[in-house]
Amino acid sequence: MFAAFMLFQYQSYLQQQLDSLKENGQYRYFLNVNKSARHFPVFYYEKNGEAKRAVNFCSNDYLGMSVEEEVINKLSFVLHQSGTGSGGTRNISGTTQYHQWLEHTIAQWHQQEAALIFGGAYLANLTALQTLGRKIPDLVFVSDERNHASIIEGIRSAGNEKKIFQHNDTKHLEQILSSLPLQQPKLVVFESVYSMNGSVAPVKQIIRLAKRYNALTYVDEVHAVGLYGARGAGICEQDNLLKQIDIINGTLAKAVGVIGGYIAASQTIIDFIRSFGSGFIFTTSLPPAVCAGAEKSIRMIQRDASLRTSVFGLVDSLRRMLDEASISYTKNNSHITPVLLKDAVKCKQIADELLEKYGVYVQPVNYPTVPVGEECLRLIVTAKHTREQITHLVNSLKNVLIEERTHYMQAEQAEFITG
């Protein structure tokens, strides 16, 4: 006689997991943004059949390069010349002059010998770290606890030993490095600008410690490229450290305004990742037109510092207005301004109110992007924002926070009376 058993209910199990996300306020809702090249950061969307407009304060298109006419024209020209896609991996017909020109430009930008482009910075991190871990015997990863998911996944998939140091804590980093044999291969992995709390890494001290203990250094400059340094090459350029860092990861999808990611390093390291990295070898290459547009954008960023100067001027204005409105935010030395709310449900409610009542789009940032208890609204201003738009943002946020606080006090009072 067969024992009674229950078949696994796939759909119901998955739905339960989704329902749990919704109950915890961690479910991710996507706003259908009708982006306008003419009006950015203003965009359009539809709500209950009604056309609406809003101002985007969460875009990573920091310099507005995605809507720059010269970049659009360059991409459009090559698009008509070379078509919409490359049609192959880099090894099989997917390498064009535009791919090579872009890699050369990136390498020069970061003062490295060579560069390698990927479909995205996530894939670049994943492939580079995974490949180094799997191919260097006994390599130990020493990673900042706040590193991006792509770094965490790259290290995890490599399967190597890993050590986690407290965020930006060079004393803890040295404790870990000094505990490992000097001859042991080591790779210190960190970000220059952390995208959620806006903290900036002590890059110089990290490099100094890595050299002392015979470790390679790997820095993710995704949120720094385009904004920092004399030619916009990032924090390493700003701190005059480009010649001292071993591997730089960057993106073409934020300040550069197109799509794709890359690593820049010595010729040997780049050739190694190119030759052994499955995430590079087996992926169709970026369209030639995208490469041409990205290279054009980088060259514009290099020669003109006015856009990044404008961004930081607007960031200063935003923070001054927040101070005047008594709205607390996380202080840091970067361009990222997080307003900490510490509650996922509240975060979503406030973001919804800002969008629906005031036409202000700020995306709530919840777990797993940030740890539970660090839910926030991450305010981003770009070179295309105006001071009038920033004033409207601050006034709107102040109104919503007052309304939320009043509602909370009334609910507490009602509970006290009925309780």
Image (cartoon, helix red, strand yellow):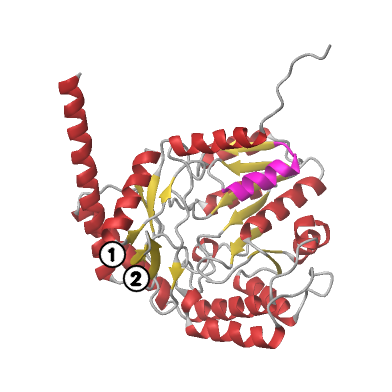
* Image spot of residue 195 (x, y percent): 48, 53
Q: Quadrant of residue 262?
A: bottom right
Q: Tell me if residue 166 comes above or below residue 102 in the rendering.
A: above
Label 2 crowd (10 A; few <14 / some 14-19 / many >=20): many
Viewer-proximal residue among 237 and 205: 237
Q: Is residue 7 left or right of residue 334?
A: right
Q: Are marks 2 and 1 in contact (CB under 8 Å)?
A: yes
Residue at (45, 73) in percent of width and height: 64
* Image spot of residue 108 (x, y percent): 64, 74
Q: Tell me if residue 339 comes above or below residue 81 in the rendering.
A: above
Q: Quadrant of residue 251?
A: bottom right
Residue 390, numbered label: 1
Number of on-image labels: 2
> What's drawn in magenta, residue-wise?
148-161
Disc 2 element: loop
Kind of residue sitting beneath label 1 = Ile
Label 1 crowd (10 A; few <14 / some 14-19 / many >=20): many
Q: Tell me if residue 372 comes above or below residue 131 in the rendering.
A: above
Viewer-proximal residue among 66 and 322: 66
Quick check: is 153 in the magenta stretch? yes
**Quadrant of the drawing holding the C terminus:** top left
Residue at (80, 62) in percent of width and height: 281
Residue designated by label 2:
385
Q: Is residue 90 left or right of residue 237?
A: right
Give the mark nearest the N terminus, 2 or 1.
2
Main SS of the magenta segment? helix
